[in-house]
């Protein structure tokens, strides 16, 4: 098995940036369903605990509203009930009914169907009645609003699709499974950062006799007699294999890496017409002081919710206001910054590159807007404390990570772009070509990507070459 990596180090979206003594995780920062990692190590005859330590985070998030009120979101049912009651006593019973639905959705959508292959439409027809019974045709926000009346609590329990590239106003209610998934298995932090997980996986691959080749940018998947036969790199090298597994963005795989004549099911035209997830603006920065009152994960909500989501997903407009996800890993692990310092990662959802935004021109002004927002809310005096800084825009996601339209999470997780409707884990018409990652079933997020590998293990147990 050979893993081909475009960048100079492993990780892809989970690449690690080291700068001025600070360590920044490039992408995923929230680890849920850790049993999937444990299962992966066990399949190789190893123990994950010998490679990586996962520490629980409590609370999972602090959700700060624009008026300064904070909701502490955790996995403790009693504490959560108390938080809901503090915000809206009349919504406690509705919240409990919603969490019961979330449990049912998790059982069906994640535990039962998360590693189903959905290789034919009959698979979809068999589960359709259950999905309809569980209101899968509705949006997450719509279902939450059915049970909860307080507008702030509607935000608290509907924002989760944003963690996997979905619009809460249109993502299928199936993704309402996430609150229960988090409650059941917790939210965790990899000691040393997500990069520690990446390093552990590299050791695991090498321990199984696999190899990783860096600076290996795939230009084309070679197709011979209707089947994948290997890949051609941008440097002209051909690498031949019996099986090719693409962990690239599924849209990029079909739009850029395959001749249009052979990718009939997902033609370039179909990829272009599909709905792709939002873009991400990510600012990594280090401060020379520690902000001890800031937790590990904080969601900083702006003045708008529904209208901001419409700007991002529908109107494709870079809004003047924003809602932010602020990650402070040094809350849990001080080794990620020099002594007495803090490392931060702040993420703002934005339109993807289908919007008319010139990020070369707007990036710094947008960063300054975010800096002011953080200075005015959680990080007073921020401008005078920054000692290191770097940014990623949707344009970087396109050029560095080859994300189609610079989207942060591949295809948007709508009902008609989920399960059978998503690019299949086994290519519909190209033999020996398989897909894993955020763009195939079941979707984005760490549990989704790992579950796509579980599907791969069923449909291509002898996979030997990864592109």
Image: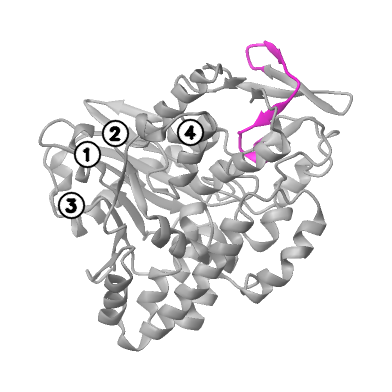
Q: Which residues are magenta?
A: 233-252
Location of the N terminus (image quadrant): top right
Residue drawn 42% across and 42% down?
28
Q: Are marks 1 and 2 in contact (CB under 8 Å)?
A: yes
Could you tell which of marks 3 and 2 lies nearer the N-terminus?
2
| Mark 4 or mark 1, whichever is nearer to me | 4
Dot 3: element: loop
Question: Would you say residue 239 sits in the magenta stretch?
Answer: yes
Residue drawn 71% across and 46% down?
423
Location of mark 3 (residue): 379
| Mark 3 or mark 2, whichever is nearer to me | 2
Horizontal placement of 128 versus 28: left or right?
A: right
Cα distance between the residues tagged 4 and 3: 39 Å
Residue 192: image tag: 2
Decide: few, some or many residues near mark 2? Use Cα within 10 Å; few <14, some 14-19, many ≥20: many
Cα distance between the residues tagged 3 and 2: 23 Å
* Position in image of residue 21 (x %, y %): 21, 26
Residue 333: image tag: 1
Could you tell which of marks 3 and 1 lies nearer the N-terminus?
1
Residue drawn 47% across and 25% down?
204
């Amino acid at each position: 098995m050979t893993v081909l990596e475009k960048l100079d180090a492993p990780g892809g979206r989970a690449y690690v940036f080291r700068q001025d003594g600070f360590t920044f995780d490039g992408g995923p920062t929230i680890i849920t369903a850790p049993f999937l990692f444990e299962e992966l190590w066990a399949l190789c005859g190893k123990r994950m605990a010998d490679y990586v330590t996962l520490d629980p985070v409590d609370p999972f998030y602090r959700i700060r509203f624009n008026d300064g009120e904070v909701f502490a979101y955790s996995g403790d049912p009693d504490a959560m009930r108390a938080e809901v009651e503090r915000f809206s006593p009349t919504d406690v019973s509705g919240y409990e009914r919603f969490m019961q639905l979330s449990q049912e959705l998790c059982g069906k959508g994640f535990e039962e169907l998360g590693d189903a292959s959905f290789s034919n439409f009959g698979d979809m027809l068999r589960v359709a009645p259950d999905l309809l019974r569980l209101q899968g045709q509705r949006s997450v926000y719509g279902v939450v609003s059915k049970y909860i009346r307080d507008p702030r609590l509607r935000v608290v329990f509907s924002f989760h699709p944003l963690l996997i590239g979905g619009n809460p106003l249109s993502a299928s209610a199936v993704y309402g499974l996430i609150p229960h998934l988090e409650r059941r298995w917790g939210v965790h932090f990899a000691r040393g950062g997500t990069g520690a997980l990446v390093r552990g996986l590299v050791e695991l691959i090498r321990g199984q006799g696999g190899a990783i080749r860096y600076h290996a940018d795939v230009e084309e998947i070679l197709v011979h007699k209707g089947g994948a036969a290997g890949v051609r790199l941008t440097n002209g090298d051909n690498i031949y294999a019996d099986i090719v597994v693409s962990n690239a963005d599924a849209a990029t795989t079909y739009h850029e890496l395959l001749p249009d004549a052979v990718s009939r099911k997902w033609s370039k035209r179909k990829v272009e017409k599909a709905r792709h997830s939002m873009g991400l603006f990510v600012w990594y920065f280090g401060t020379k002081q520690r902000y001890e009152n800031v937790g590990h994960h904080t969601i900083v909500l702006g003045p708008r919710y529904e209208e901001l989501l419409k700007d991002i997903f529908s109107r494709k407009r870079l809004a003047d206001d924003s809602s932010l996800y602020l990650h402070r890993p040094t809350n849990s692990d001080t080794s990620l910054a020099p002594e007495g310092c803090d490392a931060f990662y702040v993420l703002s959802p934005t339109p993807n590159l289908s919007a008319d935004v010139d990020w070369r021109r707007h990036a710094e002004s947008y960063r300054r807007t975010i800096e002011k927002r953080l200075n005015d809310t959680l990080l007073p005096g921020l401008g005078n404390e920054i000692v290191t800084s770097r940014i990623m825009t949707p344009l970087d996601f396109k050029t560095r990570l080859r994300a189609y339209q610079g989207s942060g999470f591949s295809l948007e997780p709508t009902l008609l772009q989920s399960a059978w409707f998503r690019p299949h884990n086994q290519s519909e018409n190209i033999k020996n070509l398989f897909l894993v990652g955020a763009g195939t079933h079941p979707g984005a997020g760490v549990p989704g990507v790992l579950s796509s590998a579980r599907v791969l293990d069923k449909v291509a147990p002898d996979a030997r070459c990864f592109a």
